Amino acid sequence: MPATAPESDSPSALRMGLSAGKSLLGGLMLGIALALLLGCTTAAFYFLRLNGPGMPAAAHAGGAGAIIALLFSPSLVVALLLVFIIPAYVFVGLQIGRARATGKLVARYGQGLSQRLAQMLAERVETMPRTHKALHRTADLLSPQLAIEHLKPWVGDGRAVQWIVRTVLNRLPLAELVEEWGQTRAEWGTEAAKGDPALRAFFGEKIQGLLQDMAEPPWMMLWLLMAAHVVILGIGIWLTA
């Protein structure tokens, strides 16, 4: 297993935190820009059509009948969907920024972080061998607060690092991993020993894979949102033609 990254000093951790913060802010700004340029523009364009020839015939009469006609009009449903897409762009942009920020932290600390968390998890698994089948979440074995406190001298206590540690511990399917490890040990025909490096390597590989998944920006989510936006707008234009 490669050696862990050297202990980072405070200025280095601060620079990394600022860099991750810029990536997060960049993703958020991307989402806001798309919301304004695409979401607000198309919504305004559609509402102008909806207020004109696209208005349901019964709505021109005014009164309660007009309100009911609008509520049950497919054109209004399209309008609501177009309005909902505006914050959806901001949300997707935030997820992209968060993934890019995570990617920078993973590139700097990922290998060492996975090894340290794997070491902590392995030590706790080895101290309670009879409770494997009762474990359903990593938090049952290792609390995020304890892990963050243990990692603070190395990676600092920034919010980005805390979010990564909490997310890893909450997403890690410990019960399934312990079962998989038990089956692997059975295939090897050997008994688990305290301080087993293979168990630590096993946990480290799983944690590293999870970190890589977290660092992958959800571009596909953005493309799907844009495609849905185009389809909804097209349906709206057809309804108000």
Image (cartoon, rainbow, N blue to C red):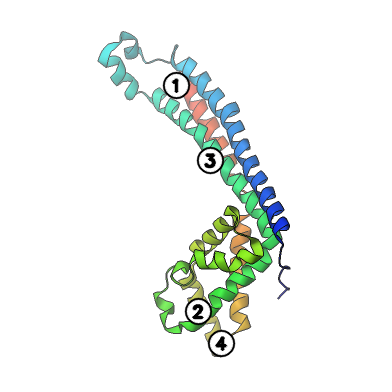
Judge by depth and name the residue closer to the eye, 212 or 14.
14
First in residue order: circle 3 vs circle 1: 3
Residue occupied by mark 1: 239
As shown in the figure, which amino acid type bears the numbered disc 2?
Answer: Val
Residue occupied by mark 4: 194
Local secondary structure at mark 1 = helix
First in residue order: circle 3 vs circle 2: 3
Nearest-to-viewer mark from 4 and 1: 4
Q: Position of residue 216 (x, y in %)?
A: 63, 53
Q: Are marks 3 and 2 in contact (CB under 8 Å)?
A: no
Whether residue 126 sits left or right of residue 111 in the image: it is: left
Residue occupied by mark 2: 125
Distance Cα–Cα, label 3 vs label 4: 45 Å
First in residue order: circle 4 vs circle 1: 4
Judge by depth and name the residue closer to the eye, 90 or 163.
163
Q: Are marks 4 and 1 in contact (CB under 8 Å)?
A: no
Residue occupied by mark 3: 91
Crowd around label 3: few <14 · some 14–19 · many ≥20 (10 Å): some
As shown in the figure, which amino acid type bears the numbered disc 3?
Answer: Phe
Distance Cα–Cα, label 3 vs label 2: 37 Å
Local secondary structure at mark 2 = helix
Distance Cα–Cα, label 3 vs label 1: 28 Å
Distance Cα–Cα, label 1 vs label 2: 61 Å
First in residue order: circle 1 vs circle 2: 2
Q: Are marks 3 and 4 in contact (CB under 8 Å)?
A: no
Residue visible at 67% across and 44% down in the picture: 22
Residue 216 visible here: no
Q: Position of residue 114 (x, y in %)?
A: 62, 68
Q: Is residue 221 above or below residue 51?
A: below
Distance Cα–Cα, label 4 vs label 1: 69 Å
